[in-house]
Image (spheres, coloured by chain):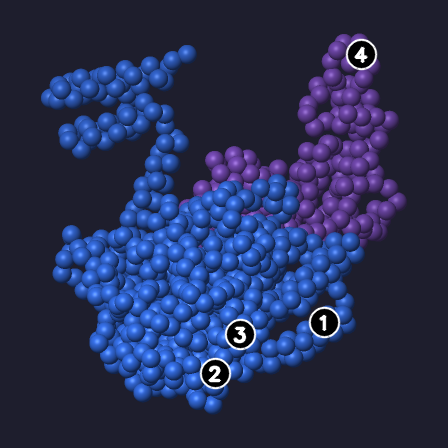
Chain colours: A purple, B blue
Amino acid sequence: MNLSAISENISRKLASRAPRKTEFTLSQKNIYIIPSQAGFGFILLIILMLLTAINYQNSLIYLFTFFLCALFFISIWLCFLNLNGLRIASYQVLECFEGELCPYSVQLLSVSKPALSLYLGSNKQSLVEANVKKDTKETLSLLLPKTRRGLHSLERLRIQSYFPFGFIVAWTWLKLDAKTLVYPEPKEGLRAIGQSSGETQNTQKLKADDLTDLKHYQQGDSASRILWKQYAAKDQLIVRNSELGGHNSLWLTWYSYEATDPEMKLRHLCFDILDFNRKQQIYGLDIPGVHIKPSSGEQHKRRCLEALALFGSKSGGERFV
Amino acid sequence: MSEQKNNYLFHYPFGAIISIIFIQLLSHYQHSPVWLIVYVAGISFFGFFTYRFMRKQVGPVIRFSLVLLSLAVFILYYKLDFTVDMAASFLLLASTLKLLELKQKKDVVLLIYVMLYLSAISFLFVQDFLHTLLQLLAIMVCLYVLLCLNGGQYFSRYQAPWSSLFKALFLAGPIVLICFLFFPRIAPLWSIPVKTQSATTGMTDFMSPGDIAELAKSSERAFRASFSQQAPAQKDLYWRGLVLDRFDGRTWRASATNSSYKRFNKIDQGRLYDHGENAYEVMLEPNNQSWVYALEPSRASSSNLLIQDMGLFKLSTDAIQPTRYKMTFKDTTTFEVSKVPGAKVLSGKDRASASMKDLLAPKNSNPRTQRYIEQLRVSFPDKEDLLTHLMVKFSQQRFFYTLKPPLLGADFVDEFLFETKRGFCAHYAGSLAYMLRLAGIPARVIVGYQGGEYNEQGGYYIIHQYDAHAWVEAKLPERGWLRVDPTAMVAPSRILDGLDEAVGGQGEFLADNLLASAAIRFSALSWVRLRMDEFNYKWQKLVVNYGEDQQQSLIKNLLSGVLPNTGNLMRVVILFGGGFVILLASTMSFLWYRQFSGRYSKVEKYYIIWLYFLSRFSNLKREIGETPKAFLIRVQSSDYQRLAKVTEKITTKLEQDQYKT
């Protein structure tokens, strides 16, 4: 085990003990520095040159050697300064479906100096490059391998940089509180026997011409349900709670599908939610522990998907979106 | 996968890498054979064009055959005989071939490291200031490439790596200075043969008629010399180099029996001393020899000199780089003067005696001369009279001083003295020494330099190769050794005004070298040439020649006032360590200052400093969240009324600064 691997381990352990935070500022306390492979090569070169200078008693080779030596030491400093003061934060919970790469939002902010040639990732193998200009905010999403549905948080974040000459590598391991919500993979499912003929048995019909069905426009309401005639006449945005044309609103329930595997059921539910949302239908979700009243719109869709993602987990009641 | 690699390749600053190779070619051109330069340049262009226009790497078949071809030519040319220039050429060749197969980042890094090492060893061959600047440029381009490799996409988008680069170079300055001055200079750990194949112009340890005329074509510098006091007159500047005391009828050679070396042990003080004696310092250009050029009579006063018999000196290591040595010089005007024209009596215990070998003269050639000397020995029984007669003869007869003498046969002395009468200093000195030996006077030929060009602004002499000269030393029983110069009898202007005057009218001076000749003749060019030479001399004295001796005397001077009784090692440790402590402290305070100054305005800074003083000298400390005004009221209500007044003033100013519109 070489030197860099040992120090790597130490820094990882130190980081794992540190508390999980949503915001970090890099400083002496969490930046680790060691010569890189190329750096050790450079030290070898300097030693070779020094031997040449001594053996040939050549003053200018001494000068040249000391110059390279000084550059090496300065690059330690520049490498540290490059990372020092960089602020790393994660406020946004990103979302994805099972079977997709899992994105985590990481925000980099550099105050009064640029931070260049940073490599970010959760392990040493797959790193993403980022450059933060002076006094700017750079938001990037780290794509990590696919995982199962649920709320996941970034296990650890590595930031490393070989800037400026590659002799030195500075890195840090952070327990950044970055989260992502993974929804079940949408899969079309067969309806359970006896339910395929009509949704009337398990789904309730709602009357479209019900006056109580009207309400004031709220953000998130589908534009297609706005009563544009009302808007022209009264300058009020009125929306119908239900679909125009008297479409039935549906209940998506746990027992609607043939599949018995709960995960598979969740996938079918996910598919239908997306499908209904696309068709701008009104639907409600009724699965064990969660009961979401029929509605439509992006926000409603998210709420339903979230319920699917968190189904069965401890934090099922929490809301993230 | 290969596609990815290829894409990665295009991030390389290929142009910069090529330009480093060309900088190295320029740095190494003096000792590299022509085929190597053409070959390396060709391959570099080839690599560049395939990269630029065909967007791909050279194929493996071409690469492999190029490697084989290079290896074959290299072995044929150098024959595996290790020399420094062979090693340099090998590195240059190998790295150029590597240029054609840069696949990964580490290939480029390796190439850059080899280039840096090549830069370092180029100083073994050339040490002047311009060359050093060229190597600085090489470092910068190398760093630029590394910066591009490690700066990621940043530079392809913003293209401003130079600021980081200049920052690094600027910061390196103080560290380099401290290391250079105080890093302990130690003796070589093991000796490496420093052989270079390149021939340098300069003296040889034998002299045939016509030899020195070759040197007269070169305007290269042999050495520089500066005196602590008044320098001797131009005509007395006879720089003795070698004693040639074996004569085979045609060629004079140095006998190889100088074994009794004494090393001069005093440390070179880094400056010329002035107690009574005139001292001079010589900066020898690299000539791969250990010969020392000294005035007569001189004593060695630097530690790199070995003392030999016959008043000669030797360098402890060959002059493979500019070498400096020091001598003290005794003025010879106090010695009695001989009646021989132009002769100077020399003293010196080492050379008081003459041996039998100084009388050996082959009798199987030059019969006419032998007969002539027999006659003279009869008519001049006194040896001094005989010498005088011979010298006068040189000026009276129609001898002609020329750089293009006619070729001479086997009996060259006969032909020269009685027929052609045209010759250069080698002819005159060689034949005179031969005649003196025939006459029973111990004599030998001395080769070295005579005169020199005075650089008035710099106050030193430049001795060029065309100042090479040969003269004779003869021993008279009652006077000791005399320096006699037959050339001075034939062409006095050679000794008084230099070669240019002596042969100027004949268009022979630097005839093959129009540029050098123009640089000496035209005053504007000459002025520029002398200023540049002066600068290079200073560079050599201060930097190139900074070694063990200079370091110790510098350290001694720096610490003599503070720590008079510390050992040498301790001094080095103190200065080396102390330097870094100072450097670190100043860096830290600079950083602190910058952080501090960026955050606060001028008035705020005063206020903060004042708060610091208050907290130090009283128990008044501003609480977190306490406004300046509230704090002021608290100070005013305390016992420190005097401090309160100042605080009031500063607080008012602060408020004006903060709330001004």
Find out whether the residues at labels 2 and 1 contact each other: C-beta distance under 8 Å: no
Crowding around mark 2 (Cα neighbors within 10 Å: few <14, some 14 to 19, many 20+) is some
Residue type at numbered disc 4? Ala
In terms of image quadrants, where is residue A245? Answer: top right
Counting residues from the start of the chain, the first of labels 2 and 3 encountered is 2
Counting residues from the start of the chain, the first of labels 3 and 1 encountered is 1
B269 or A252, nearer to the observer:
B269
Residue type at numbered disc 1? Leu
A151 or A276, nearer to the observer:
A151
Q: Nearer the viewer, mark 4 or mark 3?
A: 3
Kindly indicate whether the residues beneath marks 2 and 3 are on one polypeptide chain: yes
Farthest-out residue, top? A233
Residue type at numbered disc 3? Glu
- Residue located at (56% from left, 77% from top): B408
Q: Which residue is mark 4?
A: A232
- B61 vs B283, left or right, is right
| Disc 2 from disc 1: Cα separation | 65 Å
B56 or B619, nearer to the observer:
B56
Q: Which residue is mark 2?
A: B368
Q: Nearer the viewer, mark 2 or mark 1?
A: 2
Kindly indicate whether the residues beneath marks 4 and 3 are on one polypeptide chain: no
A221 or B52, nearer to the observer:
B52
Numbered disc 4: secondary structure: helix
The N terminus of chain B sits in image quarter: bottom right
- Residue located at (27% from left, 67% from top): B339
Subunit of label 1: B
Numbered disc 2: secondary structure: helix
Subunit of label 3: B
| Disc 4 from disc 3: Cα separation | 131 Å
Residue type at numbered disc 2? Arg
Residue B112 image offset from top left, x and y in percent: 57, 60
- Residue located at (68% from left, 23% from top): A218
